[in-house]
Amino acid sequence: MIRLKDDIDEAKERTGAWWDCRATDRALIQVKGLLEKPVLKLPVIEAETLHDWWTNPDVVVPRLLNELGSTWFGGEAFPVIQPVPGRIVSIVCKYLGAPNTYINENTTWSEPIIDDWGNPPSLEWNPDNKWWRITERNLRAAADEIRERELECFLGHPDLNGPTEVLSGLRNPERLCMDLVLEPEQVKIAARRIQDAWYKAWNGVRAITKEFGGCFTFMGLWSDVDAPDLQSDFSSLISPDMFEEFMMPLIREQINRYPRTVFHLDGPDMIRHLDILLAEQDLNAIQWVEGAGAGPVSDWLNLMKRIQDSGKSLYVYCEPWEVPKLLKKLSPRGLIMVVKDTLPLQEAKDLLATVKRLS
């Protein structure tokens, strides 16, 4: 067995407490350091095309495993391979027939396919869809490598995104805004079908990933039970009344369906919906992302305190220099700070020591 993290059990225990907003010996932090000597080094095949770079398991899996083998996982950071990268954003759009466009090695897009509500696509789940087959193939290829090399690591989910966010991608955000007024029933019918397809995608992924003892979305949060991230970034364009009417029935259904959930609150224009979310008793946590141009996350202390005061756990990305400031102003209970970049090894270890001291 190749161990990629020595303190997995302790990290699981703290993360389990975080989900329940229970106190632990310190605030939680995910911090990664660059190892001077990798514990795993596989031969890498160069991708001939962007499609290969993103989807060919012979290219993707060794590259990602080498990243794991070169990383020290501090605090509540876990070794997780995500062979369908999260940067293939809202892949459910592609499962439902949206064409994919590769921008570069960091970004892909989906093209809208709902053009006429009089003749919409079926939006039905198709297990023979090209992108679902790619997902299955890459997840199984990674699972085979983990088993064959006896790696102590986890298998992570694609970024399924939220069903209403998928609808925005399939229709176009501006057109969907108009549809909420002009075609509300068509929107609700389409959202229902997408939600049903989303569940099938989730179940299909979990059937493969659960073998390795954890449920990991793009947030890197360990859970021993299903724990999806809930998303609706499109809602930054609409009023709380519309959010309540069109989005919350589907979000509540997900909250009630799964034992653990965390909502991805992305940017200042989503704050108008926060009270509605905080009122959901069974929603475990809020991830606050300040958004581009909105300053560092430590500028949003009052908002983060508001989330903590509601009894929800809090997830934030931060820069290393912000960690002491956050610890001085926020409760360590139900707090996880995720450091954005991989640091030099000693800096990462020093930062973890700072968390232990200041908590």
Image (spheres, rainbow, N blue to C red):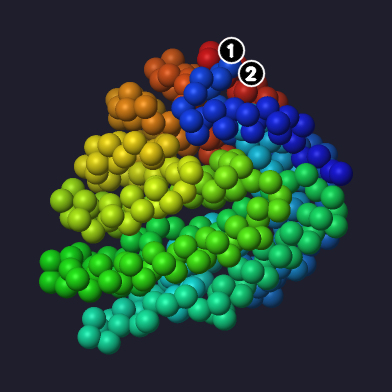
Residue receiving disc 1: 357
Which amino acid type corresponds to the residue marked 2 in the rendered image?
Ala
Quarter where residue 347 is shown: top right
Q: Which numbered marker is on residue 353?
A: 2
Q: Which numbered marker is on residue 183?
A: none
Q: Residue furthest left?
A: 182
Residue at the image point whose x is 46% and y is 27% from the top: 21
336 or 19, which is in the foreground?
A: 19
Which amino acid type corresponds to the residue marked 1 in the rendered image?
Arg
CB atoms of marks 1 and 2 within 8 Å: yes
Is disc 2 placed on a helix, strand or loop?
A: helix
Does residue 221 appear left or right of residue 92 in this picture?
Answer: right
Does residue 275 appear left or right of residue 73 in this picture?
Answer: left
247 or 352, which is in the foreground?
A: 247
Give me the C-alpha separation between circle 1 and circle 2: 6 Å
Q: Is residue 85 visible?
A: no
* x and y percentages locating residue 334 in the rendered image: 47, 26
